[in-house]
Amino acid sequence: MKEIGLVGVPYSGKTTLFRALTRIGTHGGQANHAIVPVPDPRLAVLAELERSRRIVPAQVGFVDVPGGISSAQGIARLREVDALAIVVRCFGPDQRPAKELEEVRTELLLADATVVASALEKAEKRARGKLTDEVAALRRANEALETEIWLREAGLSPEEQRHLRALAPLTLKPSVVIANLEEGAEVPPELPEGTVGVYAAIEAETLEMDPEEARALPAERGVREPGLERVIAACYRALDLVTFLTTGEDETRAWEVRRGAKAPEAAGVIHSDLERGFIRAEVVSYADLVAAGSFEAARHRGKVRVEGKDYEVREGDVLHIRFAV
Ligand SMILES: Nc1nc2c(ncn2[C@@H]2O[C@H](COP(=O)(O)OP(=O)(O)OP(=O)(O)O)[C@@H](O)[C@H]2O)c(=O)[nH]1
Ligand SMILES: [Mg+2]
């Protein structure tokens, strides 16, 4: 499971958003770690087609880091997450969302600049004047950060990124911006495209009510659609995973694998036996499967392909893995 770290200046509403996310979490979670299902409307459709007994969505973890970016422990914890969600305050007095976002981004960048500079110094000492790959990679990273370029945007090769891995740079992580809005407000235009608007306070409140009451509330108060689902979906998208599906009488389920993964690796996400004993995968796209009405009908129409070890799994593939152990 992937983890998203909530970051932002104090008072931006991270804990409020986190509380709202925790409420919809299926497995509860710890004080600062919530596990939430990733919304995916395809699951209910497939489950109905295949008369599955249950639906198992993918899950994603959210972390509300105590002390946030202002503490060394907070930064250390954030280095462990897979993606960052930057929460920007767009409620209350003196709102300055664009400036606040810039501040957070600068702090993340400075945190990386410090570790990269010190790693570079050590690597140079170890290399005794030789230009090793490690020194070269760290120099490039250091230059980028000195000119205020995020490592993610610095055009580093996978090889160069490998030399940075141990440092777990924050600015190499995917990130999304979340505007924590006042009742009825829209995402301010000065925030970047793709910013997700959320009404954390209202949503946290709503989730404490009984469902009937809650359903009536958001409309009255100007919340048009649940922001939490969009937050989860946006963070999940930022991770650049491919979601594939399995479906049958037992369950319809969403799985995640890194983009570019081949069929055996995807099979291994389900169970290591399926990777070791992988023979082939029967693959049908979600759209083709739904259009056909069932796996059997899709097979008849020739929409179910038989793919081998080199097949790269695509978003929305429905897989049947054939294996032998
Ligand atoms: N009006 C309004 N108030 C909010 C909203 N979100 C949070 N608040 C309030 O803002 C205050 C700060 O919210 P927190 O969620 O604790 O903020 P935080 O980012 O976790 O702050 P730190 O943990 O100190 O960094 C609380 O009093 C919240 O009730 C919102 O969307 N609208
Ligand atoms: Mg907090």
Image (spheres, rainbow, N blue to C red):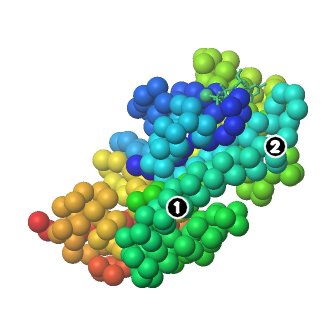
Taking 33 as reference, is 257 above or below it?
below
Mark 1 residue crowding within 10 angstroms, few (<14) / some (14–19) / many (20+): many
Amino acid on which disc 2 is placed: Pro
Question: Mark 2 = which residue?
Answer: 97
In the image, residue 139 lies at what x, y percent? 54, 73
Quadrant location, ligand no. 1: top right
- Is residue 272 shown left or right of residue 223? left
Q: Position of residue 296 (x, y in %)?
A: 36, 67
On screen, residue 167 versus residue 321, left or right, reads right
Query: Measuring 67% from the left and 40% from the top, which residue is drawn there?
Result: 8
Give the mark nearer the N terminus: 2 vs 1. Answer: 2
Q: Is residue 29 above or below residue 227?
A: above
- Badge 2 crowding class, 10 Å Cα cut-off, few under 14, some 14 to 19, many 20 or more, is many
In depth, the one of 240 and 214 nearer the eye is 240
Q: Does residue 266 appear to the left or right of 243 in the view shown?
A: left
| Residue at the spot of label 1 | 116
Q: Nearer the viewer, residue 308 or 305?
A: 308
Name the quadrant containing residue 221: top right
Q: Secondary structure at mark 1?
A: helix
Taking the spot 31% from the left edge, 68% from the top edge, the residue there is 265
| Distance of label 2 from label 1 (alpha carbons) | 29 Å
Residue at point 42%, 30% (across, down): 29
Query: Is the CB of mark 2 within 8 Å of ligand 1?
Result: no
Q: Secondary structure at mark 2?
A: helix
Q: Is residue 263 something that shows in the picture? A: yes
Amino acid type, residue under disc 1 in the picture: Val
